[in-house]
Every structure is written in structure tokens, then in C-alpha cells.
Amino acid sequence: QCHDITVYGDRAYVAWRDKGVIILDISNPRTPTRVGEINWGDVSRPLAFPGKPAEPFHPIPSQVHSIGVVVPKRGRRVETVIAGDEVGRCPGGYMHIIDVRNEKRPQEISDFQTPFNRGGNCPYDRNVSRSAMHDVDRMIRGNIAWAAWEEGGFWGVDIKDIHYPRAAAWYVPPARSDAGRAGSSHADDMTTGSFGSDSGLVFGNGSDAGAGGIWAFRYNPGYSATVRWNSDETNVIVTETR
């Protein structure tokens, strides 16, 4: 099933659930045509690192939810997109960074996983998609890709070196007393809007009781704090720790 779509120029990058990512040419909106795709379950896709032999991917159901375009310099075509998949079993879905310069055969070049996504940390007795990646900023302008990881909170991923993404920031909303799932919070979507990630302004939302509504963030490298609800749960109290 088609779950979501991100459009840039005359290309539509489509999140197609268990298939993966489909690229459509929409230069003629009356007759969109498929240019290429990447299928998560295709074991022929090699995973290669410098100086190491290629290894096949393990085929898994993907549940691709959304796609972010790394916005190119003016006049250039898109080279990289980032997809998130909400896999409902261990190790849970995570961030896939995809080279689309060869549109007919896109290639996954790296990924980013939270500690939860790594198999040994995965609780097999629950629906792990609730801590899998759900959404990514659709227009990534700058070196930080922002994504929502459901019960895993909001994460910023430094993609300056596209082959070795790393954690840059994270925020897990505190759960209120009316949280529905055993006291957990929830993160649905993230965006920098028209500001761009380098401005430091980030917006996220959650749909569940316990972290519902809109969250506004400012990216501040090196800052850390504890966050809790006040007594009547109308606001959060931030206590700086660094």
C-alpha cells in the first residue's frame, strides 16, 4: 500500500509499505511513470563498506512510512533520500539512507539505528513498531535529519558524512499520568518547516495521551537536561544538567 509521498521537482518519492521506496516521474501529471524502486526484501542488494566484501541484506517486511529528501543545491537533482520503516518485529524499523543518483536502481548506502533497534535490546513480548521510526523531516536542509521514533522520542541525526550517520540530539517526552500504554509517551512527526535544520528550530507532534500535541524544540549542541511534568501536568519543567 502507498502510505506517504514526498515531491521534489518532477519526482515523487513514494513510501510503499512492504515494497520499499518507489520513484515516479511526474513531469506530466496526467501520466506518472515509475522510474525505479528499492525493495527492502530484495536479498540481491549488496551492503558494502570500504575495504570489506559485500554482504547481502536480510529480507524483512518494511512498512515504509515516510521519505525525506536531502535538498540539493539550486539547479541540481536529488542525490539522497532518507526513508523510515515501522517494522513490527525485532529489531524494529530504523533510518535508511538511500543513494538515488541512479534512479533506476537506488542503493542503500548507510543506516542509523537507535539502541532499541539493535537486536539484543528488543523486547519480544510487545509490538516493537511502537519504538520504530515513524516519520522524517520531508525537506532536509542542512546536516541534521530529524525523525520521530514513536515511543523512542524525537531524534536528530548528523548526516554530514552520509556514509556514517551519528546521533546529534534526542528528546523523549515525559509521559503524563493519562498515558495509554503502560506510561509511555509517543512521537509521531517532525519538521523544520521552511527554517531548515541549521536554524536550530524543530517541531514535532505526538498523537497519544501522555505526549499528545505539538512540541517546539531548539537544537543546542552540548546541552542536556531532565524534563518532567509539573504537578497539574499543564507544562514541563526543564532542569539543566549540562
Image: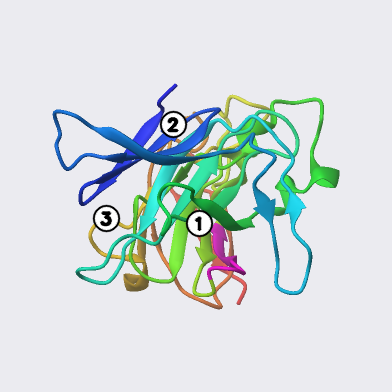
Magenta span contains residue 165: yes
The structure residue drawn at horizontal position 51% and vertical position 76%, both measured from the top left corner, is: 221
Of callouts 2 and 1, the N-terminal one? 2
Q: Amino acid at mark 1?
A: Ile
Left or right of 49 on screen, residue 165 = left
Judged by depth in the image, the label closer to the viewer, 2 or 1, is 2
Q: Amino acid at mark 2?
A: Ser
Mark 3 element type: loop
- Give the residue pinned by disc 2: 207
Q: Residue 205: give its label.
A: none
> Within the image, what quadrant is residue 86 found in?
top right
The magenta span reads 162-170
Left or right of 83 on screen, residue 53 = right
Of callouts 3 and 1, the N-terminal one? 3
Q: Residues within 10 Å of mark 1 (few under 14, many from 20)?
A: few
- Give the residue pinned by disc 3: 193
The structure residue drawn at horizontal position 79% and vertical position 39%, both measured from the top left corner, is: 122
The quarter of the picture where the N terminus appears is: top left
Q: Is residue 176 above or below residue 48?
A: above
> Within the image, what quadrant is residue 183 found in?
top right
Mark 1 element type: strand
Q: Residue 237: give its label.
A: 1
Q: Alpha-carbon distance for marks 2 and 3?
A: 19 Å
